[in-house]
Image (spheres, grey):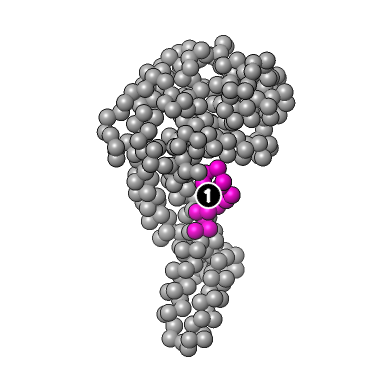
Amino acid sequence: MNISLSGFPAYIALILFLLMFAILPMYFLSKVRRKSYEFARQYDTIVKTEYDPPYGLTPAELGYIVDAKFSKREFFATILDLEQRGFIEINKSLYSYELLKLSLETSKLHKHEKLIVHNFTNTSSLSLENRKNLKRFRQTVLSSLVSKGLVKPSAAEEKVSFLAGRIILTLLVINTLLTILITFADDGSLFETIFFALLIPIMITPITLPISIVLGYVYHKIVGETGLWTKEMKQAWVEIAGYSHFVKQVELDNIQFESSELKSKTKIKAFPYAVALGLDTNWEKRFRE
């Protein structure tokens, strides 16, 4: 049976074929890079158990530092923390919920906590349509970590996301390598060599761009934003890891027991931190039931 591909199917087949050879090296490179950022192994093999969040870290700050990524967990952990401390109230209706601002003074809150109190309360929509405010939330968390010396100052000035930057860098590396290989594989005049060196990146980008998107995403997923961590962060890591260990090993059982049905709000201080760490707390039920 003869099988031939042409047009769009051939384009997809070529991309998948090239990905087969590129995805595994990128995966292992990402793993190695991530391991190089594991500060606990570099500075101290003994975890120092902490019973309170070190450096006055909020749930959002701790959740970001531990895995070097932002997700919905940091946002909702902050909501639950503010509710627990009496700044807001989660008011559930039949189909949705809203946040009600209470009368406590908010001047001493962190900027990302104030952002939720002032921009997300008294509205019937917490859908992530509000992308501008969510981006501001992430930036204010980073700014707070910058002030504590745990992430680099460039974090507060970031214009291009880490994911987009890594996709662009991957594209440039692939295009450069292929251009060198293709150009110098052909014995031509100097003019032809220069001409093809300029033309080849444009010609191969429709193929290398989707490959770069996949490879950049894999790298970003594994490595996170660890490139923003500072030397001070390396020294602080054992305390941060110690508090995370305390929440996972000691407080999680209490949280699961007290909030199994979540008919009343849990009073355990570590609850929002457990949410930010992605532990099994059934926190979604606070917004569904």
Report the front residue among 187 and 75: 75
Report the front residue among 8 and 257: 257
Give the residue displayed 48% in from the left and 88% down from the top. 189
Give the residue displayed 35% in from the left and 35% down from the top. 235
The image shows residue 47 at horizontal and vertical percentages of 30, 28
* 149 relative to 289, above or below: below
State the residue lying farthest toward the left: 45
The image shows residue 76 at horizontal and vertical percentages of 57, 27
Image quarter (top left, top right, bottom left or bottom right) of the C terminus: top right
Report the front residue among 268 and 5: 268
User: Residue 83: within the magenta?
Assistant: no
Give the residue displayed 45% in from the left and 50% down from the top. 219
Left or right: where does residue 11 sit relative to residue 278?
right
Q: Residues within 10 Å of mark 1 (few under 14, many from 20)?
A: some
Residue annotated with mark 1? 163
The amino acid pointed to by label 1 is Leu
Q: Which residues are magenta?
A: 154-169
